[in-house]
Image: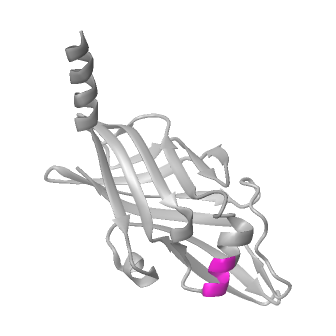
Amino acid sequence: MKFFIFFYLFIQILWAKEINYHFVDYNEAKKSSNFLKFESESTKLGLVTTSFDGYAKKFKIIYERKNNQITKLQVIVDANSLDTDNDSRNEKMFGKCLESNKYHQITYDLTKPIGLNKTEAQAEGLLKIRGKKLNTPLNLSIVKAQQKYTVSGSAKFSLTQFEIPDPSISIASVKDEFDLFFKIELE
């Protein structure tokens, strides 16, 4: 009986795959074909609106693929690795907004399998920021090339929904809604 339990656990380990990404800086993360990115806007003095973005420099993806489905998926982002290419914005993001010294990770956990036999799909999962988990659907585009799948997609989230303090300052207000974009390659 112990053999069968060991064999089952061994097979589970073989099915689970882990991909780790680590980029040196904002520019390297931005140039990578595999990325996690966020975008939003800020308005200065109520007159000029500009967009800004940021990238995860360190994240990992753990997933299980069975036949033409991703049955399990977890994305783990090192909160201190987010980079907007602006030191003062990063400091506020790590300290006031994310409290990254307390909440070290941002995670996304798939709650329903994703079929890989389509070119478009919607994933359902839980996004966890600052210890708060919310259902966050992802709009996906799936491209199969040989034995690999390129999965890209997007989602939206609100600072207010995640109880993230408003990073606005007296001369610049930050939009509450953020857009997430990603592109990853899976086997």
Left or right: residue 33 versus residue 25 is left
Q: Does the magenta stretch include residue 79?
A: no
Residue in the foreground of this view, choosing between 167 and 100:
100
Q: Position of residue 187 (x, y in %)?
A: 22, 49
Residue 146 vs 49, above or below: the answer is above
Q: Where is residue 42 in the image (x, y as percent from the top left)?
A: 71, 80
Residue 30 vs 151, above or below: the answer is below
Q: Where is residue 93 in the image (x, y as percent from the top left)?
A: 67, 72
Q: Which residue is drawn at the image coordinates 22% and 37% (left, top)?
A: 14
Q: Main secondary structure of the magenta part?
A: helix
Check the picture and name the quadrant holding the N terminus: top left
Name the residue at the right extreme: 170
Name the residue at the front extreme: 2
Q: Which residue is drawn at the image coordinates 58% and 65% (left, top)?
A: 179
Residue 67 vs 94, above or below: the answer is above
Q: Which residue is drawn at the image coordinates 59% and 80% (left, top)?
A: 52
Q: Which residue is drawn at the image coordinates 47% and 54% (left, top)?
A: 76
Q: Give the range drawn in magenta.
A: 87-91
Q: Position of residue 184 (x, y in %)?
A: 34, 59
Residue 65 vs 132, above or below: the answer is above
- Dividing the picture into quarters, in which one does residue 121 lie? top left
